[in-house]
Amino acid sequence: MVDMIASFTRFPWNHQNTIVVFNQLKKQNKAYQAIQTMRYDSKMLRGWGDYQITAFFNRVDKMQAVVDVYEELLRTIAGYNSAGIEGPEMEILLEPLLLDSGWYKKKLDVACEHAYFVEYGFGDFKMMFIKSILPANDYRNMKYNNIEVTFTYEGYAGGGSWYVGGNKYRMIQFKDDENTQYYRVVKAKSEKK
């Protein structure tokens, strides 16, 4: 897991490497999920002491959390749809790992009522996110804080429109050796949905 994450973190510009890392993380995540199914299988864990079991699953929980957030991060780059990364996962888990590895973070100067734009990068690689500032969705009580953010690129006739869940980061563009187009957002507006 550490080797896979380090490979992307140090070489994000190489798209083919990112695809390999993404696919390996998916396999790793399936392995962790299989281990998690053993958690309550008393036959499987009969020979272990309570401390050993707790320590083992605590370690698996931590590793799976890292794999989950990196898999979600790379999903868009790999060509899949992503619902976004939860605010705490990005800010507490992923962002420190990136920044400690020499990446930069830049909050972009784009005014928007319910969101802001942020860019992360390393070398020639960049990725831009919309971050919803509304509270996370409360599915249990059916309270949703989804927004639609519409934005315009500089020097380009187009832009885009993305739905972002409450307190989520949603990647809207990235730049690597295969995806070289990257635009500056000049204006944006958001609407609660």
Image (cartoon, rainbow, N blue to C red):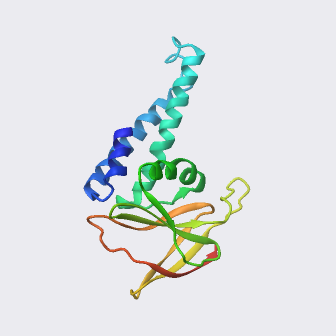
* Image coordinates for residue 167, horizontal then vertical, percent: 62, 60
- Which picture quadrant has residue 192? bottom right
* Image coordinates for residue 157, horizontal then vertical, percent: 40, 88
* Horizontal side of residue 77 vs 85, given as left or right: left
* Horizontal side of residue 45 vs 173, given as left or right: right
Q: In front here: 15 or 82? A: 15
Residue visible at 53% across and 13% down?
46
* Image coordinates for residue 80, horizontal then vertical, percent: 39, 60
Q: How many marks?
A: 0
- Which picture quadrant has residue 86? bottom right
Q: Residue furthest top?
A: 47
Residue visible at 54% across and 61% down?
169
Q: Is residue 75 above or below residue 182?
A: above
Q: Can residue 1 be seen at all in this image of the molecule?
A: no
Rendered-image quadrant of the C terminus: bottom right
Q: Is residue 131 above or below residue 153?
A: above
Q: Can residue 48 be seen at all in this image of the molecule?
A: yes
Q: Is residue 40 above or below residue 186?
A: above
Q: Residue furthest right?
A: 141
* Image coordinates for residue 67, horizontal then vertical, percent: 45, 43
Rendered-image quadrant of the N terminus: top left
Residue visible at 49% across and 32% down?
60
Q: Is residue 50 above or below residue 4?
A: above
Q: In front here: 151 or 43? A: 151
